[in-house]
Amino acid sequence: MLILSRGESGLREGKAAIEDKVSGAVVKYIASDIGAAMSADDTCEELVEQIKASTDGGNVAVLVNCAGLSYPGAMRFHEIGTEKFPDSDTQLISRLCRLNMESMARLTHAVLPWMVAKKAGTVINISSGNGRLPMGAPMYALYSGSKAFVDYFSRSLNAEYTPLGIQVESHSPNFVISDMSGYKAKHKSFTIVTPAEYASAAVQCIGKYDSVTPVFSHWLQDYVVQLLPLWLSRGMIAGMHSGLRAKHLRKIKRDSEAKGASGNDKKGQ
Ligand SMILES: NC(=O)c1ccc[n+]([C@@H]2O[C@H](COP(=O)([O-])OP(=O)(O)OC[C@H]3O[C@@H](n4cnc5c(N)ncnc54)[C@H](OP(=O)(O)O)[C@@H]3O)[C@@H](O)[C@H]2O)c1
């Protein structure tokens, strides 16, 4: 198994945890910023060469494109990079597009020839329930659009590559406890699931669908939203996300006050 992310200490921990749990597993890792590797050139050649060297010349059975980036909190699209939202910058737009869409497309493009040669392989791309809402996701427009891209890109590729023996599928979670969602273990509920619960549901789905919401409670949430008239679901989601924007603004205010207080403390020392 080869795992890839930016932080070397997290990768070391991941390697140790998997090798500890799965007898005989050998885990290698590459510490790399995939988004930056994509911007280095048009082919991300250096990273692809590293992956090839770590997988016995491209012996990849399953590729999981999971790394993703969202907004630091809900906000209107024109507010990205403004003074009102100092936890964002205008580069967020290119960073998000690069990581959520371009790097996923390029890594898939790099690995497919190896799979085509063997007439076997599976590509799993992690989308999001946010990319499948019938009314879109106001206050998360770019994230939602990027995840809709992941979903349709994967479905299209699946139709293209199934005749060649390769499965391409998109998996769409709703809330999973993680740094990105901001949910912690204490928030666990029917709809907010742990990474282990998510992974266990996702593994059951591999090879069965071109696009899937693996967790039952997430599937149920999506099903109910799809049943509602659009005016109602749009109003509900817009109201919910406006609430998240207000919460985000309150956090920015708290952080700025705390920063001001610590600045004053330092001056007073
Ligand atoms: N959590 C949810 O509720 C939720 C819901 C729907 C969809 N998703 C999707 O699920 C996927 C995983 O989300 P998560 O909640 O686990 O997010 P997370 O807690 O932010 O973790 C993201 C992972 O991607 C790696 N990563 C981030 N930027 C990277 C980069 N530029 N290059 C290489 N690796 C990078 C991070 O490791 P390093 O920081 O070490 O690089 C980390 O391992 C994402 O695609 C997300 O959109 C999550």
Image (spheres, rainbow, N blue to C red):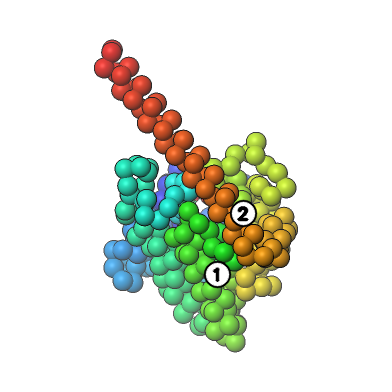
Task: Give SS at disc 2.
Answer: helix
Q: Which mark is residue 195?
A: none
- Of 157 and 31, nearer the camera is 157
Look at the numbered discs 2 and 1 and tell me whether their residues touch, using CB distance below 8 Å: no
Is residue 36 depicted above or below 242 in this figure? below
Q: Give the residue number, with chain letter if any, for mark 1.
A: 151
Asked which quadrant contains residue 234, the reply is: bottom right
Most distant residue in the front direction: 231
Mark 2 or 1, which is nearer the eye? 2
Q: Give the residue number, with chain letter if any, for mark 2.
A: 236
Q: In terms of sequence position, does the residue under pointer 2 or pointer 1 come before the other?
A: 1
Q: Position of residue 91 (x, y in %)?
A: 32, 54
Residue drawn at point x = 62 percent, y = 70 percent: 211
Task: Give SS at disc 1.
Answer: helix
Q: Amino acid at mark 2?
A: Met
Residue drawn at point x = 57 percent, y = 64 percent: 135
Q: Amino acid at mark 1?
A: Asp
